[in-house]
Amino acid sequence: MQIPDVKSEWDNEISTVKIGATEKEGGTRSANISVGGETTLPFLHFEGSTPHRPVLAMEVWDIPPDSWPPVAREQIEGVMEDPVEWAQKCEEEFEPDLVCLKLKGCDPFGQDKSPEEAAKLVEKVIEATSIPLIVWGCGDDDKDNEVFTLVSPAAAGENCLLGTITEDNYRTLAALSKADGHKIVAESPVDINMAKQVNTLALDIGFELENLVIFPNSPALGYGIEYVYSIMERTRLAGLKGDRLMAQPILANIGGEVWGTKEAKIPEEEKPEWGDHRKRGPMWEATTAFTYLQSGADIVVMRHPESIKATKLMIERLMEGRGE
Amino acid sequence: MPKVKFSVMDRLVDVEVPEGTTLLDAASDADLHINSICGGEGICGKCKVKVEEGDVRAGSTTTLSREEIKSGYTLACQTFIQGDVKVRLPPESAAGQGKILVDEDAQRFKALTSVGVGSSVSYEPLIEKHYLDIPEPSLKDNLSDHRRIYRELRRKKDIPIMQTGLKVFKRSSSLLRENDWKITATLGRRGDTTEVIQLEGGDTSDTNYGVAVDIGTTTVVAHLVDLVSSETIDAEAKYNSQMKYGEEITRRIHHVEEEGREDLQDTIAEDINDLIYVLVDRKGVNLKDLTSIMCSGNTAMMHFLLGLEASNIRKKPYVPNTTRPPPIRAAEVGIKINPRGLLYFMPAIGGWVGGDVTSGVLSTGIHKSEKLSMLTDIGTNGEILIGNKDWMMSCAASAGPAFEGSGIRSGMRASKGAIDKVEITDDQLMYSVIGSTKPKGICGSGFIDLVASLFEGGYVNRSGKLVPENSDRIQQEDGELKIVMVESSETKGTGELAVYQSEIKNLINAKAAIYAGARILMKSLELELEDLDRLLIAGGFGSYLDREKAKTLGLIPDIPSDKVKFVGNTSIIGAKMSLLSQQAYDQSHEISESVTYYDLIDYPDYFEEFTAAKFLPHTDLSQFSSVAVKNREGD
């Protein structure tokens, strides 16, 4: 039986975003990485090209991650008190593509660390690592604006990915990133229209969409993943069909989501029928990651070395068809 | 000092004045206007007010009737305050100079009197008066008085079924004989039956009035129509006092469920009475000559006024008690016109698409046209209808009261003192005020203009957020951004006029609701914008809305301006047509039956369409290419 040709022709290409700068490029990274550039849906190598494989980032916090369950925490035993050592260990032992430094300690309702402290930490992490860096704010709009005002110039030239801008707070970070040569994460609350709206707002104040990645939020497996799956897929379809405002790489930030679920957290002793939690937790995170990769994610931010390893393997296999 | 409490319609105003002050002066101290043309001499009798409680000393009352004095009426200029008093002022003290273009509507309507021309309808009021010169009875012609009157009426007009109430023919024998067999009969249409609703001595056939009322969720408008000349002779509007039970219909239905139907019924009847009172008072029309009232409004408003069970309208599958109530005696619901006068309703289409849309179709002739039209009624309960003579489909989109100047701190109805147009050129904010006075507030069209201009000038971003970096006028107040339109020194004693961030957001939500409704209706019908031959915009602000600005905001679809037509308050125009033409009234029933009602609430993508439209002009700029081009040029 003849299998019909199901190839689609797409009008547009997803923009390519380069993160990290080598010495030649004015930074200190050993190499930079690129994401995006697809001319087809994920891994459909027979139809179009996927010039850059999806990349994985590993979370590092500026405070000890007390909220993480033991399974996730024990991997970083001994270094989690010191974010610089933690970042170093990540790079050397777990080999992610990027480090994602989360400035949780700056939260005014938490430890309320100062912008100066945050900027100093960013400098140290840059010094101690050689892979590209994502810096993620604490989520409080006003505080993040103060923090990034110092963090962004402190990392100037390194071409970091800074996050996030939202519909309510985008001017400061967009302006800083433009000035200091960074890329930004545009966040929207699980809504395809609002994703586009944030991009439009950034564009309206002169931020080039080629320097931006879309983050539509990314719940864990079992917690609304199918909803975001379809939003990511529709975003990508719109981008490929020619909507310039939707043709950016997509980021999924799943660590905090996955490791907050009972499926990842509850130990075997409490739920013997669910099996070994040391395997279950990483599997939950890896499965969540696979799912988003299939719907269009280009960057996945994760926590557990085992799930990162499994996801990397999966990406390699799926990318093998390249060039055919 | 004695305290004076004035009540004007639904407003209370307190003032303290020295003992011995006249009520007229006290009212003026309280910034309330009482009519008086004799300058306080007690001659003109225009300053009639009602003392409800308290201590006053009244002087001359020659212009008042005994009943009036008994029920507490007095002349404000001749009444001296002795102690604390409560005084009710006539409604016109509350009303500004209405912006409703009586003449324009009247002209539009004159075409109707040209009987049966083109798409027009024939003149034949629902309630008409016939003068009868009846032959006296004799032994040869000894029909009963009752049948004699019917015979004479049938000589004038083909009336198959006639009925008369006992009250009326009880008086007929003496009336006929006292008036030398010359009487005037008032006929009212009730379904297929014609009722003789009153008999009067002599020829009164040249005095017959009706009132058309548009009962909006936020605004109630009444037009006084001379049923003989078919001219609109006056108009008045006010906010719907039901707003105290909730701005949205569903809240009001909830109130009915909790507290019973009386509150809402009484409030709207009272509003209508207030408007009627102002109209007849101003035009010197006797209430007994006001024989009919035609109401047009959304289905819930109809239920509220008639005291019908409304709670099913808000529950799935949103079934109303009725869409076409029969005519009733207006007095039955507490409306004060001729005690035997009839109250009619424009038939509704569904639970959320009311008689106002039927009126809209009737008055714009969509139901007779080959052309494919979209009718958008921009109001609190927005409605959209698409169709032509072969088919019509409509849906409702709840927008909230932002379009009518309500729910905005500086908002007001489109009456004297309202900012109705706004333009920003070279960072200068310019505006025009109705009645060319100092501004008191901003009305719906002004608000739409303002937000569109702010967007064009970059003072709000595409999300409708104010950008404080771009203007000194944008300031922070209690944690919320506002834009100052008019400094307090420039206003008419109302203090600074500002529009707040949350209010701009409300307007954007309102326009998004309307646009999303229109878009879904189009999508469901698999229509493209190019398929539309015309876009008719109905609503209180009529031609005061700026077409281009409405597009800039994304309130109306981006179609060529020559296809966009403002048709005004079609709800009231249709109601007047029906009052004046039985043929039009019959057509309205055909329309209400032939429109398919499409429920947006269950449309799966409604929320998504709504979110997409909550951007200026829209998230999908390809739907607004003319606006997008304009913006780019402005950059």
Image: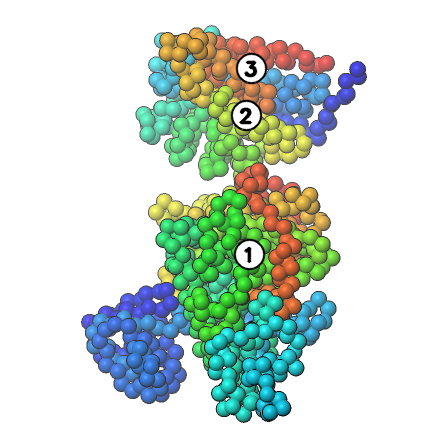
Q: How is the image coloured?
A: rainbow
Residue A210 seen anywhere in this rendered image of the structure: no
Question: In the image, which disc is placed on residue B323?
Answer: 1
Q: Are marks 2 and 1 in contact (CB under 8 Å)?
A: no
Q: Are marks 1 and 3 in contact (CB under 8 Å)?
A: no
Which one is nearer the viewer's eye here, A183 or A61?
A61
Residue B12: percent from left, percent from top: 32, 65
Q: Check the image and report above or below for B139 versus B518.
A: below
* Residue B409, quarter of the rendered image: bottom left
Residue designated by label 3: A31
Residue name at image x 69 percent, y 43 percent: B526
Same chain for mark 2 and mark 1? The answer is no
Residue type, mark 2 in image = Glu
For mark 3, give the secondary structure: loop
* Residue A19, quarter of the rendered image: top right
Q: Check the image and report above or below for B60 versus A124.
A: below
For mark 1, give the secondary structure: loop
Distance from Cα at disc 2 to Cα at disc 1: 43 Å
The chain carrying label 3 is A
Residue B480 seen anywhere in this rendered image of the structure: yes
Distance from Cα at disc 3 to Cα at disc 2: 35 Å
Which one is nearer the viewer's eye here, B398 or B563?
B398
The chain carrying label 1 is B
Residue designated by label 2: A226
Residue name at image x 70 percent, y 21 percent: A48
